[in-house]
Amino acid sequence: MLLIASIIWGTSFAAIKVGVSQVDVYAFTFLRYGVAAISIIIILLLMRSGWGIFRWKELWYLAIINAVAALLQNIGMMMTTATDALLLIDINVVYIALIAALVLKEKLTKQVALGLTLGLAGVIFIATEGNPANIFNGSATGNIIVFAASVIWAVYVVYLTKILRVKGRIIEATGVIMVETTLVLAPICLVLATSWSSSLVGWSSIIYLGLASTTFASFLYSYGLERLGATLSSIIMMAEIVFGLLFSYLLLGEQWDGATVIGGAFIMLAIAVISIRLDSVRGDGSVQE
């Protein structure tokens, strides 16, 4: 289940890149989550879940955080490649460990410090394309925006962990946050979207991401973690990067320049270094994009 989720999430970056090129970014974001929300409500009805979980105010706070991160990721991906976005988003595993040390009072070890250093080096290489003078060009700006989304999602994961350690109900909470994210996005996207028209390709991207990535993969991930624990999560993170790079090449024809290769190597090494630490943080039903 976890491997299937990683494959689906690996394809999502290429699908988002296609989607934001075909549809207004605000309309795209809202419609993706809207499709997911409809499917999730049906699943929750079939599960006969109690609706009291919608009254958990903590989940509404997380939905706001998730909505902001989703918008930033999609806006940033209008200006950068799916490959760079994949690496910059998945580096959040390193920042999860740092934030967990601050919020969950977990020990900040030398292992975490090394992971942070390697991860930061990788982010700088990718964000600047290996040249600090590029910091203000379009691609670098997109990379910075995507990285901001990554850090925000790290905050989201840690606070979700904190809540679910007390209240549980991982699978249901995951679904509820996605539904509430749609409601948070609605007023923002309805005001800021300049067009709601889309090509067939754009609609295909929206439906695929809404059903496969946001709903199906998220439930698979939560279901697997609830039963198997978080010990496989670091492997899943690495697998998502591999599949994401593969699909970005096969579907978009993206080539990897020197900065991406070097930065990607630093990021994958950082994730490998931090993976043991990750086990204590990711047993939470968190949702990747």
Image (spheres, rainbow, N blue to C red):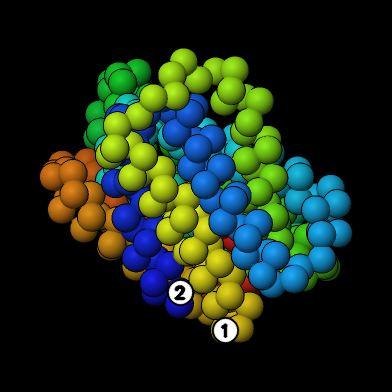
- Residue 210 at what x, y percent from top left? 47, 50
The vertical placement of 230 against 180, above or below, is: below
**The residue under label 1 is which amino acid type?**
Leu
The numbered mark, 2 or 1, whose residue comes first in the sequence reads: 2
The numbered disc on residue 228 is: 1
Q: For marks 2 and 1, give the CA distance.
A: 10 Å
At label 2, counting other C-alpha atoms closer than 10 Å, the crowd grade (few under 14, some 14-19, many 20 or more) is many
- Residue 221 at what x, y percent from top left? 52, 69
Q: Residue at x 56, y 42 (%)?
A: 34
Q: Is residue 1 visible?
A: yes
The numbered disc on residue 2 is: 2
The vertical placement of 169 against 178, above or below, is: below
Q: Residue at x 56, y 56 (%)?
A: 39
The vertical placement of 82 against 238, above or below, is: above
Residue contact between numbered discs 2 and 1, judged by CB atoms under 8 Å: yes
- Residue 106 at what x, y percent from top left? 71, 64
Instruction: Report the side of 17 relative to 98 (left or right).
Output: left
Which quadrant, please, contains the N terminus? bottom left
At label 1, counting other C-alpha atoms closer than 10 Å, the crowd grade (few under 14, some 14-19, many 20 or more) is few
Q: Residue at x 29, y 32 (%)?
A: 199
**Tally of numbered tags:** 2
Instruction: Report the side of 143 relative to 35 (left or right).
Output: left
- Residue 202 at what x, y percent from top left? 33, 37
**The residue under label 2 is which amino acid type?**
Leu
Disc 1 secondary structure class: helix
Instruction: Report the side of 227 relative to 137 (left or right).
Output: right
